[in-house]
Amino acid sequence: MSDIVNDAPLRDIPLRSNRFRREREAEWQRLESLLKLAEAGRWRRLSDDDLLAIPVLYRSAISALSIARATSLDQGLVRYLEALCTRAYFFVYGGRASLGERLGSFFARGWARAVQGLWRELLAAFLVTLLGAVVAYAMVQADPDWYRSFVPAGLSGGRDPEATAQYLRSTLYDEGRNGGDALSIFATYLFTHNARIAIMTFALGFAFGVPTLLLLAYNGAMLGAMLAVFIRKDLGFELGGWLMIHGVTELLAIILAGAAGLRIGLAVAFPGADSRLASASLAGRQAATAMGGVVVMLVLAGLLEGFGRQLIQGDLWRYAIAGSTAVFWALYFGWPRGRAA
């Protein structure tokens, strides 16, 4: 007899669950149907009353879930309510911006504001790059043997102080089949090298920014050494046009990546009142936003390099495109942007 009495509450659980479900199932079904329309993007089919009803139905479902857990109703009902409440939670409290809206906000405000917040690091990265270029240029002009210390063999490919002016010129213009092939290899290696430098300058910033500074200086030194070789053959103007048609965007991307790495490095080195982890985390969010745009800049630089190299052979046209991209980036990053509403 005692066994029968003790088992009675267990036998009553399905009955209580069914009664509990019948009393509230209509509300759950309505909430689920409204969520399906919203999740499918069919907002126009939701009336004002429907939109106002969703938070109310959500709170009712949360209450039902609490009762179901407290009274040990069947686990199938509990799991159903958990899933329903989770979906409703993201609708009521989560962001409902579409991918297009998020991308629009990123390019309209987020990216530029992140870069503007890095202006000190950006200036430092630019000065370090410039210093590396000036020092390497002066050293190669004084002693051409320094060239191989700054320019890797894969990038050099015969573009060294011993090369003739005719050969150096052929690497800047699509002059016949062989010239075009050599130029393709040169452009591909240069883009791959610069993309790798950009990623490394950011990724190594956590080490107090020291590797970032060294990489920026090295990248500037490579540019300065190459300029010295071409200028010695009276091809500095031509090299400048070829480099800048894509280099304005590509070099700026590297400097931005360096600035993002420096921000993290400074946050780790000088955390202030926060812990190093908290300081690095805060700096990392801003730096990551800037780096998201750096990836876009590298893609654009690759397109400019590929199409510009093949389709635009005139030096003045190359400089015109380079100047246009410089003005565009200056306006894009320099234009003041208010806080999003």
Image (cartoon, rainbow, N blue to C red):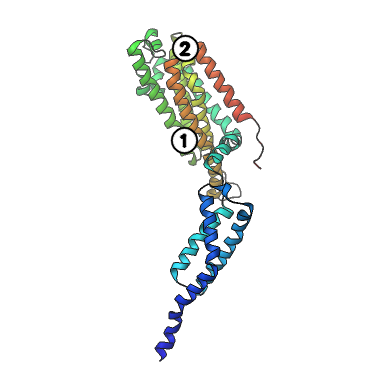
Dot 1, how many residues are within 10 Å of its Cα: few (below 14), some (14-19), or many (20+)? many
The residue drawn where x is 51% and y is 13% is 317
- Quarter residue 167 falls in: top left
Q: Residue at label 2?
A: 238
- Residue type beneath disc 1: Pro
Q: Position of residue 87 (x, y in %)?
A: 51, 56
Identify the element where label 1 is drawn: helix
Q: Position of residue 102 (x, y in %)?
A: 55, 41
Quick check: 247 left or right of 181? right
Which one is nearer the viewer's eye here, 109 or 92? 92
Q: Quadrant of the N terminus?
A: bottom left
Dot 2, how many residues are within 10 Å of its Cα: few (below 14), some (14-19), or many (20+)? some
The residue drawn where x is 49% and y is 38% is 205
**Number of numbered labels in the structure image:** 2
- Is the residue under label 2 in contact with that under label 1 (CB below 8 Å)? no
Quick check: 63 left or right of 222? right
Q: Position of residue 325 (x, y in %)?
A: 55, 22
Q: CA distance from mark 1 to mark 2?
A: 32 Å
Q: Residue at label 1?
A: 211
Identify the element where label 2 is drawn: helix
Q: Position of residue 339 (x, y in %)?
A: 66, 40
